[in-house]
Image (cartoon, grey):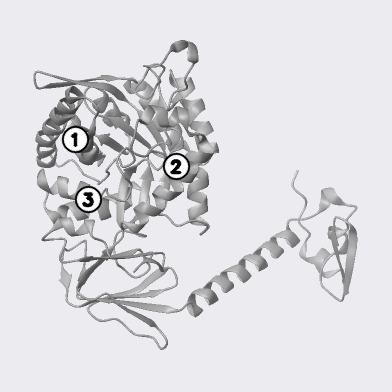
């Protein structure tokens, strides 16, 4: 039962205030208009919220004042370059400048204020633009046999590798990423995200999913090992609606920002026809979406084709990653609900060139060619796009190739940049915080040679990286 709050008369009737902690009375302050009995240490069931609330408010005000003071006293930095790209309009300012105070942008344009004592960083013949976003990465993977990595390498070892991957991505200009599953490392990505947030290791801002979710014998299960060895799956099993709810609750408890579910696989291409097996019914996916939504979270799915992609769209997922083939009805639903497609062309290209067998390389080349054809249909249908590379199986820090492939297969350079920075910010839940060089946004800024609206490949030549006002590459 909540304690009774003293009346105004009761408060005015007392002239002493006894301050107490767990050890008893430690101070007596005379002539204060408070009621002594409300603060007597032996009367624990009658302690009011009044004094603790005042204490909390005082501390909060002190912290806010301190934060404001630190921001105001933080050194100013002025970034100067030959050009600055306004992502929303596509307009190039010549020259371009960004004024940074602390971790935020104060001003941007052709000419900004130069406060006394500000550090001026002249980036010469380059273009300033927001830090890049990769909406589909695997920090816990590296090139090589993926199934063996998860069996042979310990979780601590893989976590160390993940921090190195995060650094490589940041140095390549990716200041925000969505990690789409640790592939058997459980919730270890929580530690990586938190270490980055605390400034212990360099890396992009992260949205993490923990271990992804899969069915028994599904896409990420250890299907080709000796069953007697009981090799673990690279995802967490959930075989029905009740298990989905339980696993989602566990992953959110362990720090996941969103839920990643494998909805399709394996994929086959026969005589130019693509097909894939669905893993969860529409009802099961709807249960997952509703459970995640209960706590303000979203569900993203690995889904390459029908009917799994349709089930996912009807359930209301936030993104359909890979999206190799979508029916007309699914594309219409994605357009109406603004469900993002994340094509991940780079991973298909990489496997088509690096898989062990010629047969598998040919299969992956067919997958890529069909995906490119379907991608153009999706653009024509108004399916919203975000940029994600599926980096991990190929080297971290090289995923800007995804921009080049999206342009090659049908998007303009500016539309690709807008898909990455505007749509990516929405997808990651940082709209109004990242993706544009506007006052109040995080100072996540990169510089590239040339004009990326004319030559998208310059994104593979990042020369300067700032995240949250801190320069990481110069």
7 left or right, relative to 455: right
Asked if disc 2 and disc 3 are in contact, CB closer than 8 Å, the reply is no
Q: Nearer the viewer, mark 2 or mark 1?
A: 1
Asked if disc 3 and disc 1 are in contact, CB closer than 8 Å, the reply is no
Q: Is residue 408 above or below residue 111?
A: above
Q: Quadrant of the C terminus?
A: bottom left
- Disc 2 secondary structure class: loop
Residue 432, by quadrant, is: bottom left
31 left or right, relative to 372: right
Q: Disc 3 and disc 1: Cα gap in Å?
A: 27 Å
Q: Is residue 226 above or below residue 321?
A: above
Asked if disc 2 and disc 1 are in contact, CB closer than 8 Å, the reply is no
- Alpha-carbon neighbours of circle 3 within 10 Å: few (<14), some, or many (≥20)? many
420 left or right, relative to 147: left
Q: Quadrant of the N terminus?
A: top right
Instruction: Specify the label residue 419 is tagged with.
Output: 3
Judging by the rendered image, the residue that carries numbered circle 1 is 353
Lower position in the chain sequence, tag 3 or tag 1: 1
- Residue 267, given in percent of the width and then of the height, sits at 23, 22
Q: Nearer the viewer, mark 3 or mark 1?
A: 1
Residue shown at 20% from the left, 55% from the top: 417
Q: Disc 2 and disc 1: Cα gap in Å?
A: 40 Å
- Disc 1 secondary structure class: helix
Asked if residue 414 can be seen in this view, the reply is no
Residue 107, by quadrant, is: bottom left
- Residue 327, given in percent of the width and then of the height, sits at 15, 27
Q: Disc 2 and disc 3: Cα gap in Å?
A: 23 Å
Lower position in the chain sequence, tag 2 or tag 3: 2
Q: Nearer the viewer, residue 121 or 114?
A: 121
Residue shown at 87% from the left, 64% from the top: 36
Judging by the rendered image, the residue that carries numbered circle 2 is 296
């Amino acid at each position: 039962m909540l304690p009774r709050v003293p009346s105004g008369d009761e408060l005015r009737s007392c002239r002493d205030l006894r301050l107490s902690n767990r050890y008893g009375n430690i101070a007596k302050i005379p002539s204060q208009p408070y009621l002594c009995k409300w603060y007597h240490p032996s009367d624990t069931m009658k302690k009011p919220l009044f004094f603790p609330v005042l204490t909390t408010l005082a501390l909060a005000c002190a912290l806010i004042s301190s934060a404001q003071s630190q921001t105001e006293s933080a050194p100013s930095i002025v970034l100067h370059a030959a050009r600055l790209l306004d992502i929303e309009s596509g307009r190039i300012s010549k020259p371009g400048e960004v004024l940074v105070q602390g971790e935020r942008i104060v001003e941007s344009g052709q000419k900004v204020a130069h406060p006394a004592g500000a550090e001026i960083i002249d980036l010469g013949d380059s273009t300033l633009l927001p830090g890049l976003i990769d909406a589909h990465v695997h920090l816990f993977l590296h090139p090589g046999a993926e199934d063996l990595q998860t069996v042979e390498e310990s979780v601590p070892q893989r976590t160390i590798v993940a921090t190195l991957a995060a650094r490589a991505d940041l140095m390549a200009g990716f200041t925000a990423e969505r990690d789409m599953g640790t592939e058997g490392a459980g919730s270890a990505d929580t530690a990586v995200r938190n270490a980055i947030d605390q400034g212990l290791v360099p890396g992009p801002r992260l949205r993490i999913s923990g271990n992804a979710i899969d069915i028994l014998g599904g896409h990420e299960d250890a299907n080709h090992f000796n069953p007697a060895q009981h090799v673990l799956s690279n995802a967490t099993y959930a075989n029905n609606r009740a298990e989905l709810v339980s696993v989602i609750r566990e992953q959110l408890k362990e720090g996941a920002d969103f839920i990643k579910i494998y909805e399709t696989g394996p994929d086959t291409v026969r005589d130019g026809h693509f097909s894939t097996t669905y893993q969860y019914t529409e009802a099961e996916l709807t249960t997952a979406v509703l459970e995640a939504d209960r706590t303000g979270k979203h569900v993203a799915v690995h889904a390459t084709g029908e009917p799994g992609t349709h089930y996912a769209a009807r359930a209301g997922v936030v993104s359909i990653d890979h999206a190799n083939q979508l029916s007309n009805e699914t594309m219409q639903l994605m357009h109406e609900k603004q469900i993002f497609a994340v094509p991940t062309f780079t991973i298909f290209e990489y496997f088509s060139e690096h898989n062990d067998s010629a047969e598998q390389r040919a299969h992956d080349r067919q997958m890529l060619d069909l995906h490119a054809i379907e991608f153009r249909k999706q653009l024509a249908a108004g399916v919203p796009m975000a940029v994600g590379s599926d980096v991990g199986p190929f080297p971290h820090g090289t995923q800007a190739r995804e921009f080049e492939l999206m342009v090659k297969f049908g998007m303009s350079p500016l539309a690709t940049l807008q898909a990455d920075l505007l749509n990516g910010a929405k997808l990651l839940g940082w709209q109004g915080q990242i993706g544009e060089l506007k006052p109040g946004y995080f100072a996540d800024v990169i510089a590239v040679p040339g004009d990326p609206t004319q030559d998208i490949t310059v994104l593979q030549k990042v020369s300067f990286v700032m995240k949250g006002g801190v320069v990481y590459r110069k």
